[in-house]
Each structure stands twice: as C-alpha cells, then as structure tokens.
Image (cartoon, rainbow, N blue to C red):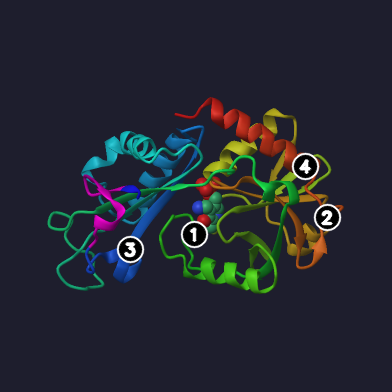
Amino acid sequence: MRTVYVNGEYLPENEAKVSIFDRAFLMADGVYEVTSVLQGKLIDFAGHARRLERSLRELDMDRPDAFDDLLEIHRELVRRNGIEEGLVYLQITRGAAPDRDFAFPDPEEVKPTLVLFTQSKPGLADSPMARTGIKVISIADERWGRRDIKTVQLLYPSMGKMMAKKAGCDDAWMIEDGYVTEGTSNNAYIIKGNRIITRGLSNDILHGITRAAVLRYAREAQMEVEERNFTIDEAKAADEAFVTSASTFVMPVVEIDGVAIGDGTPGPHATRLREIYLEESLKEAV
Ligand code: PMP
C-alpha cells in the first residue's frame, strides 16, 4: 500500500482523508503539479515549484505552511514508496470552508489543503509508445480562458481524451479560432525541415515545464525554434509532430485525424529530442 501525504502527515493511502467541504471537491478550486521521477530522482523540480507558486498567486490562494518543505516531502514520498520511475502528484486547494459559498473564504480562517501521492510507472523512460508514436484527433478547444493556471478543472481535457479513445486514437489536439492550442495534457509541436514550430506562451496554453527545457535543448542542438500559431492543416503537412509533458517527456505524433505525418513513424528530430531531454534532465535531477 502506498504512503501518501496529507496536510503534514504521512499516511497509508486508505487512511488519508479530505473534507467533503473542500473547495476543490465543490468548485475545482485547486491547483496541481506532476513531477516525474527517473532513477529515483525528481526531474525539473525547481520549474514545477516556480509554476505552482505562480498558479497560487494568479488565484489569490495562500501558500500552505509546508511550501518551503515541498522538495523534502517529494523526496520522502519517493523514498518511502520506493519509486524508481514514475511521478509525484501534488495538489493544493483553497481548503474546506464551513459552508459552500462562491466567495473565497477568509484565508486567516480557512487553511489550504496540501496532498501529495506517488504513482509508480516502470518503463516511463524506455516507453514502447515512444517507439511507435501516438495518434491524435483534432477537437474544438472548449476549456476556460486561463489555461496558463494549472487548475484541477480537467473535465474537458478528460472528455477530449475519451473522444480520442472512441476514435481509436491516443489523444486530442484542441483547436481555437483555427489554430492548435495544445494536447489534452501536453504541449503540441510540428517540425518542418530543421524548424520546430509551437504556439507561443499566453493565457491560452499551459506553460509546460518540459516545453521550456525541450526548446532550450533544441536551440543548443542548432535546431531552429519558431514560437507561433499553426493550423491543423499545417500540422498534417509537417515532416514530424510531437507533444511534451512531464510524464511523457517528448512523445512523437505519427497521425493526425487519420493523416500520416511524414512516413507515419516517429521522426528523427523528435526521437533525438527525446534522447537529449532524458539525458540532460537526468543530469540536473534532484
Ligand atoms: N498542457 C496541458 C494542458 C497540460 O495538462 C500539461 C501537463 N500537465 C502540459 C501542457 C505539459 O506541461 P508539463 O510539461 O509542465 O508537464
């Protein structure tokens, strides 16, 4: 049985409890982060901690008292659960107010809820999926407008994932005003020649921690990076496509809406970027 962390305590998962009045349960009033673990170490912890702090600030939510101990708590959970490859999920909510009310509770009276748990995922780095690539469909982006804040309101992305599954695919790329925003839980890229094209940062997409690292490594490897909008038709005509996220790293996309990308197998640039990402991010893992 897993050991999880809830508000200062390490507990067996079946003893961990959160109030039914918790605002994340009632209003999706919570933010989260997912940090991957490779060789028992945390990948880009500092980046995730920075984004978490930003998400809290944007929602006017207090940092939990244990905020400065988050690295230690992550490490302790990885150690106690013997995680070699997998991830640590962290969630902070605005806490449990005495009654359901749209207005935020007084932060002096209601303290944030802090929950962390691990998921073991052997084969995360040497993933069979990365060797075949994934298939995506395009769907309308019907999420709210502040996708730069990593909130737990994941119903539409979850529905998108189900639409993809129903179509015999792995994921969905979302489209707004004619342009691809991102995948249901990842950032989206296409490659033309030696050039990587991905949507620029704004409130329309999550500012991926993996995205930042991959674009840095790509520039260091003399690839060109163009941050701009692209259409699904441009994507279908690209040489390669891929997605990035903390739990999939760099994942090649080999089909969009039934159209093969390139020759329909993972492209050389995406494959190389995955290798570089795994190698370089492990060097800085903590
Ligand atoms: N976009 C969305 C909508 C996501 O949910 C995620 C993963 N949480 C990402 C992008 C990728 O972000 P990261 O690289 O920080 O995992």
Q: Amino acid at mark 3?
A: Asp
Q: Badge 4: few (under 14), some or many (20 or more) residues near its Cα, within 10 Å?
A: some
**In this picture, is 280 found above or below 164?**
above
Q: How much space separates mark 1 and mark 2, taking CA atoms?
A: 30 Å
179 vs 212, left or right, is right
156 sits left or right of 217 in the view = left
**Which mark lies nearer to you, 3 or 2?**
2
On whether residue 8 falls in the magenta region, the answer is yes
The structure residue drawn at horizontal position 72% and vertical position 29%, both measured from the top left corner, is 221
Callout 4, which amino acid? Arg
Residue 196 in the figure: left or right of residue 149: right
Residue 152 vs residue 204, the one in the foreground: 152
Check the image and name the residue furthest to the top: 283
The three-letter code of the residue at mark 1 reads Arg
Extent of the magenta region:
4-18
Under 8 Å from ligand 1: the CB of mark 3? no
The label number, if any, that marks residue 264 in the structure image: 2
| 3 and 2 marks in contact (CB < 8 Å) | no
Q: Find disc 4 in the rendering and name its residue.
A: 195
To which residue does mark 1 refer? 147
The local secondary structure at tag 2 comes to: loop
What is the crowding at mark 2: few (fewer than 14 residues within 10 Å), some, or many (at least 20)? some
Cα gap from disc 4 to disc 1, whole angstroms: 26 Å
Amino acid type indicated by mark 2: Gly
Mark 1 Cβ inside 8 Å of ligand 1: yes
Q: Are marks 4 and 2 in contact (CB under 8 Å)?
A: no
Instruction: Kindly report the distance in space between the C-alpha atoms of the residues bearing marks 4 and 2.
Output: 19 Å
The mark nearer the N terminus, 4 or 2, is: 4
The quadrant where residue 138 appears? bottom right
Query: Image point 22% across, 64% down: which residue?
Result: 19
